[in-house]
Image: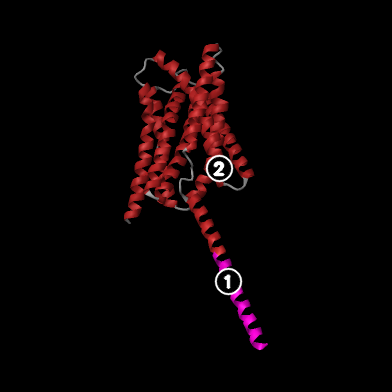
Amino acid sequence: MDSMENIWLGAIGSTLLVSILSFSGILLLAMRAKKLERIVFILVSFAIGALFGNTFFMLIPESFALIENTRLIGILIVSGLVVMFILEKMIHWHHCHNVSHKHETAPLGYISLVTDSLHNFTDGVLIAAAWMASPGVGIATTIAVILHEIPQEISDFGVLLHAGFSRKKALFLNFIAACAAILGAVVTILLGNLSEMLITYILPFAAGGFIYLAGSDLIPELHRESSARKSWIQLSAILAGIVLMFFISLNHSHDHGDGHNHGTEIHNHDHSSHEHEADEHGHDEHNHDGHNHDQEDHNH
């Protein structure tokens, strides 16, 4: 019981800490509107790099490590793209049927919230699975998630501001999306081994969502700026996001000693057992042959 209590405390505490990181955007609240506008323009560019980096250096490679059927991975990635397209269409239809002359938020803001929630949910699954393995693995995984969440949360906040949300609303909604990590942790502990299957298929689906958000919604926003100087700043920010996620991916893996590693351990254990059985079998055959040989000699 004590062990289970430690898992619950560790997993919920860690995911709560990760969720609170969504308030990193509060650093931008004190800025004046004009300066904030300039910062948001850079943050959107950084978000594109971070989204692509996270997708191609972490989510997709991890999907290939966990799912043997490569065709299924492709289907899930494309499904993520298609579902986000349908979701955005629905948001557009909703906006068309509820025309208001007041300040209106762009659909990309809602798409960002959905993809971010999916990503945070998988982080929660990872953290809980790690705590179920051991406290040490749980702490290491939490640190790895925090490292990639801080830049991600600040850039997500920038995307919401760019989409037209007020500062306070963007901060609040970003926190709600971040709380999906807590939900992921709870579901993982309650479902136990079934959660491994859950995260396995969420990863490539979330990857498709990120590709859609970065490629279809955010990049076209950058093309509105034709200034050569600002274009170079955009490119630099995109590359910075990609490079940051690349270096984080070197020290971050979604298997963190959980079921995937246990599966390897079991496989190795089985392999060793087979070898041991083979040795014993060989030894028995040797003894049997030796016994027959002795019997022949005796008969002779």
Q: Which amino acid does label 2 sit on?
A: Ser
Mark closer to the observer (1, 2) = 1
The percent position of residue 228, horizontal first and vertical second, equals 55, 12
> Which residue is pictured at 44% across the width and 15% down the height?
38
Q: How far apart are marks 1 and 2 (CA)?
A: 43 Å
Looking at the figure, which quarter contains the N terminus? bottom left
Name the colour scheme: secondary structure
> Which residue is pictured at 36% across the width and 21% down the height?
29
Q: Is residue 204 visible?
A: no
Q: Judge by depth and name the residue closer to the eye, 268 or 129.
A: 268
> Which residue is pictured at 57% across the width and 27% down the height?
215
Q: Which region shows up in magenta?
A: 276-300
Figure check: 289 above or below 154: below
Give the SS element for disc 2. helix
Position of 129 compared to 207: left or right? left
Marking on residue 283: 1
- Quick check: is 144 in the magenta stretch? no
Q: In this figure, which residue is indicated by the disc labeled 2?
A: 63
The percent position of residue 237, horizontal first and vertical second, equals 50, 22
Q: Judge by depth and name the residue closer to the eye, 134 or 52.
A: 134
The percent position of residue 121, horizontal first and vertical second, equals 45, 40
> Which residue is pictured at 56% across the width and 38% down the height?
60
